[in-house]
Amino acid sequence: MDLTGIHLFKGLGPAELKPLEAISTPRKFEKGDTLFVEGESPDNLWFILDGEVKIFKEYSSGKSAIMGIYGEGEAVAIVAVIDGKAYPASCQAIIGGNAVVMKRSDALKVVTTNPKLALEVMMDLCGRLRTMTTHLGSMSVQSVIRRLSRFLLRLADEMGVKKGGGTHVNLFLTRKELAECIGTSFEVVVRCLGKLKDEGILEIEGKKLVIYDREKLDKIAEAEGD
């Protein structure tokens, strides 16, 4: 099994990848499939080969919040697997794809006997902490349209295809899910998308997003003092 596309293993050579390949099981998932549920024992570590999944929490009020979107080459549930505590959120596929699954006991055994891999795991956790800190900071001080612009630019960078004078993105998220990703309401996201459309920056029809003016969107995303 080829694990070279997984970000966490980028620094490992063929000999170091062999023990990981030996404990890896391929897993196919379809849109809407649940990979794991909040509160369950963290028995498995997931690596996404292709497709997209969301990590989300549901609250007693009936509201939910998307904590993150993970795609090609990314590890899912690594924190829970390391500390052994229950999954802190649920995971569901939003685009069908393929994954590699490792049992927690097997993964820990390999990590603890491979210093180089252990360092890579530490670096990954540090990166997640930095990203979370930045995200929480932006939620408190940035305007919604700035947060939305940054999120759309990220999608364009990761999934966009340039053609016909614009960047085309297959928008796999609903407007409600977009709102959950940036910490606002459905109504506010719709208004912000309308504003960006009126200014000629983008066009959005159903699941199709086209960014026509990347420069303007960059300026909104990086604007100070809003």
Image: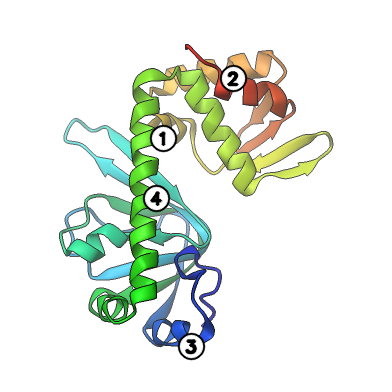
Residue designated by label 2: 220
Specify whether residue 34 is in view.
Answer: no
Give the residue type that dot 3 points to: Ala
Horizontally, residue 112 falls left or right of residue 146, namely left
Disc on res. 127: 4
- The answer to whether residue 67 is above or below residue 18 is above
Horizontally, residue 127 falls left or right of residue 49, namely left
Give the residue type that dot 1 points to: Cys
Task: Look at the numbered discs 1 and 4 and tell me whether their residues touch, using CB distance below 8 Å.
Answer: no
Horizontally, residue 196 falls left or right of residue 25, namely right
**Mark 1 or 4, nearer chain start:** 4
Residue designated by label 1: 181
- The answer to whether residue 105 is above or below residue 142 is below
Task: Look at the numbered discs 3 and 1 and tell me whether their residues touch, using CB distance below 8 Å.
Answer: no
Label 4 environment density (alpha carbons within 10 Å; few <14, some 14–19, many ≥20): few
Residue at coordinates 18% horizontally, 62% vertically from top-left? 83
Residue designated by label 3: 15
Decide which of 127, 187 is in the foreground and name it: 127
Q: Give the number of the mark in front: 2 or 3.
A: 3
**Mark 2 or 3, nearer chain start:** 3
**Mark 3 or 1, nearer chain start:** 3
Residue at coordinates 39% horizontally, 34% vertically from top-left? 134
Give the residue type that dot 4 points to: Gly
